[in-house]
Amino acid sequence: MGKASNRKRLTRSAARSFVGKGKGNRHRSGSTLSRPRPQSRGVERLTIAIDGPSGAGKSTVASSLGRRLGYLYIDTGAMYRSVALRVKEKGVMLEDELAVGRVASSLHITFATEGDQTHVFCEGRDITEAIRTPEISRLASSISKQKGVREALVRIQREMGREGGVILEGRDIGTVVFPDADVKFYLDADSDERVRRRHHELAERGVKADLEETRGELLQRDHNDMHRSHSPLKKADDALLIDTTHRSVEEIVEEMIDIVKAKSKG
Ligand code: DC
């Protein structure tokens, strides 16, 4: 990661800060989307796809990029997690794919930023913390295999990104959700580093987790994401691969901004 000691390292905790500043800056799927004020002028409203495995730093750089460009940042993983939480709360059996799909289709998700912190609301309830537990991570990984869930969430994501000026981050953005995205990035990092980041993120949130357990779960989820039959995680042919292992957030974001600007000048 960065050489300078004051450089921010890639941790998931910084990743929640996206889409502009100020209380109540809310946006939701497909309706009134409030956008942050651009800090970079003269950049067209492009669609930017960021994919990659867990702990690659996608959310951190996507949120920072969103603020710099004045683009909406959409954390699609939070959407799968929200469906998982609702499925659990409603007592829906995972095997009942029709019922799980119905939960996904009726998902009413809202993202709101307050200063540097982004909150996720489901039907008006703040579920930011509730969707970050290891149990919900496992459940999200499991329901994200289901075709009905993916179709419902992809529909919502396309609606959210319809107008451009948007950064979507996930596993299938450049391959399935927006295969024609203007700019595609695929972020990756050494698995040890990804595990370290995830462990650090859990510790920061007060979740005690064994490092080896975190490793097992993260690698298992990556394996599931890469090997499922519907929309597996893979790099789009035209995505730019960025290895974040030894780099600072600032360096990566600067590189991305240069690429986005070059693209928007056409
Ligand atoms: O990025 P995350 O850890 O918050 O994602 C949670 C789960 O959702 C993870 O198992 C991968 C899955 N996911 C997906 O299948 N497709 C996406 N576009 C985003 C996340």
Image (tube, grey):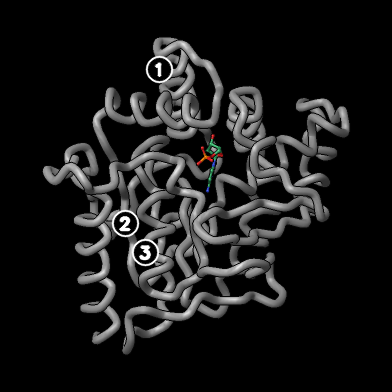
Q: Give the left or right position of residue 128, taking residue 218 as reference.
A: right
Give residue 250's position: percent from left, percent from top.
24, 56
C-alpha distance separating marks 3 and 1? 28 Å
Q: Most extreme residue toward the front, as rendered?
A: 6
Kind of residue at disc 2: Phe
- The first of marks 3 and 1 along the sequence is 3
Residue 51 got which mark?
none
Label 1: which secondary element: helix
- Rate crowding at label 2 as few (under 14), some (14 to 19) or many (20 or more) other CA atoms within 10 Å: many
Taking depth in this image into account, of 224 and 111 the one nearest to the observer is: 111
Q: Residue 242 versus residue 147: which sits nearer the camera?
A: 242
Q: Which residue is mark 3?
A: 65
The answer to whether one can see residue 26 in this image is no
Q: Which badge, 3 or 2, is on the more N-terminal residue? A: 3
Picture quarter with the N terminus: top left
Quadrant for the C terminus in the image: bottom left
Mark 3 or 2, which is nearer the eye?
A: 3
Picture residue at 31% right of the left edge, 56% below the top: 185
Q: Position of residue 68 (x, y in %)?
A: 36, 70
Which residue is identified by label 2?
Answer: 185
| Amino acid carrying mark 3 in the image | Leu
Q: Quadrant of residue 149?
A: top right
- At 57% from the left edge and 54% from the top edge, which residue is drawn? 118
Task: Check disc 1 and report the residue beneath it.
Answer: 215
Q: Nearer the viewer, mark 3 or mark 1?
A: 3
Residue drawn at (53%, 16%), measured in percent from left and top?
208
On screen, residue 81 versus residue 261, left or right, reads right
What is the residue that sits farthest to the bottom in this orientation?
42
